[in-house]
Amino acid sequence: MSLPDQIDSEERLETWLSEPTPGVTEVLQRHPGDILLLGAAGKMGPSLARLIRRSDEVSGIKRRVWAVSRFSQPAQETALQAAGAETIRGDLLDPSLAARLPEAPMVVFMTGMKFGATGQESRLWAMNTLVPARLADRFRSSRWLAFSTGNVYPLRRPEDGGCTEEDAPDPVGEYGMSALGRERVLDFMSREHGIPMSVVRLNYACDLRYGVLVDVARRIARHEPVPLGMAWFNTIWQGDANAMALQALDRAASPPFVINVTGPETLRVREVAGRLGRILGKSVSFEGEEGTTALLNDASRAIALWGPPRVPADRMVSWVGHWMAGGGRTLDKPTRFEVRSGRF
């Protein structure tokens, strides 16, 4: 795959985000059944649905893809329908919804709560533990792919490398604790009922409209200082994150198969900001002292299984910088990567 120097339209962006890989196509050929996407209206849902559809076009598979969400923004539902998904409106906190959902051999669990949790801690725990328990009970006969987060790990010194799947979880803050609670609930249901599951601990997916790189670029464009408290980070092109996640479906097992998904590079905020500033033609200022630890994951296992991401961090930085310089639209959904307390 030859990467372009720049991406200059959302149509082209969506095409690159959903470019099928041979690995995804092979996995979906081995699992040709219908797919239920739960919590599909987030940042990754539409491109994931489109990736499934485009892979199926390559292999000639006919399957139904359902996308479930409250769809608080009509554009979210429209995007999923355009991607070829059949949408189902409903609040996953509503216990009656599970009974109304169609049977599906495969479930992709993308729902959860992170932002706005401060002051709504009970809702945070309900979304992140009660909802997966209910749905795992409903879909005991399905193969599961569940998205989790690197926030279940402790902060690490960059010189020590990121956390691996063998490192014990030790989350900072209530969001990370509830995300670990989600994993524990799914682990219990998998063991109790023999449900094959894969759990993907994702660390900062990025396209050109959101992600850590976009957060830094927006601050520079607005002449705002870039925070240095969380001085290092990992990120991965959203298309690569979706491709690795779908390939993890093939490894679903009981107890669950757990895998870190992120880019192989450990990026320094100060250096990334300097490069983005040069692309944007803006001076860069910073605030705070560089932290000695950060939220860092080691994705060596995923890379050994499925190869490195197709889009390296260097190219992502360039794409984001030129996208912002050209006035490209952003989703205004900051990652809040700079938060060290775990309170979002």
Image: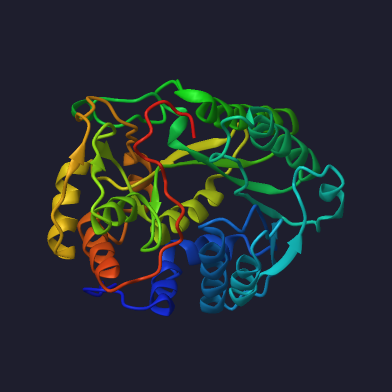
| Vertical comparison of 277 with 230: above or below | below
| Residue under the image location 25 percent in, 74 percent down | 6
Image-based side of 35 in relation to 100, left or right: left
The answer to whether residue 219 is above or below residue 50 is above
Q: Which quadrant would residue 286 be assigned to in this image?
A: top left
Residue 212: percent from left, percent from top: 34, 49
Q: Compared to 319, does 291 lie above or below?
A: above
Residue at the image point whose x is 29% and y is 33% from the top = 230
Q: Nearer the viewer, residue 11 or 307?
A: 11
State left or right for residue 300 relative to residue 50: left
Please state, as top left, top right, bottom left or bottom right, where the N terminus lies in the image.
bottom left
Q: Position of residue 198 (x, y in %)?
A: 56, 42
Image point (56%, 31%), residue name: 118
Q: Is residue 36 above or below residue 256?
A: below
User: Residue 222 placed where, x, y %?
Assistant: 28, 56
Q: Identify the residue at image location x=49%, y=51%.
A: 245
Color style of the picture: rainbow
In the rendered structure, the answer to whether residue 310 lies left or right of residue 334 reads: left
Image location of residue 24, percent across then percent down: 48, 62
Q: Nearer the viewer, residue 256 or 110?
A: 110
Query: Who is closer to the viewer here, 31 or 278?
Result: 278
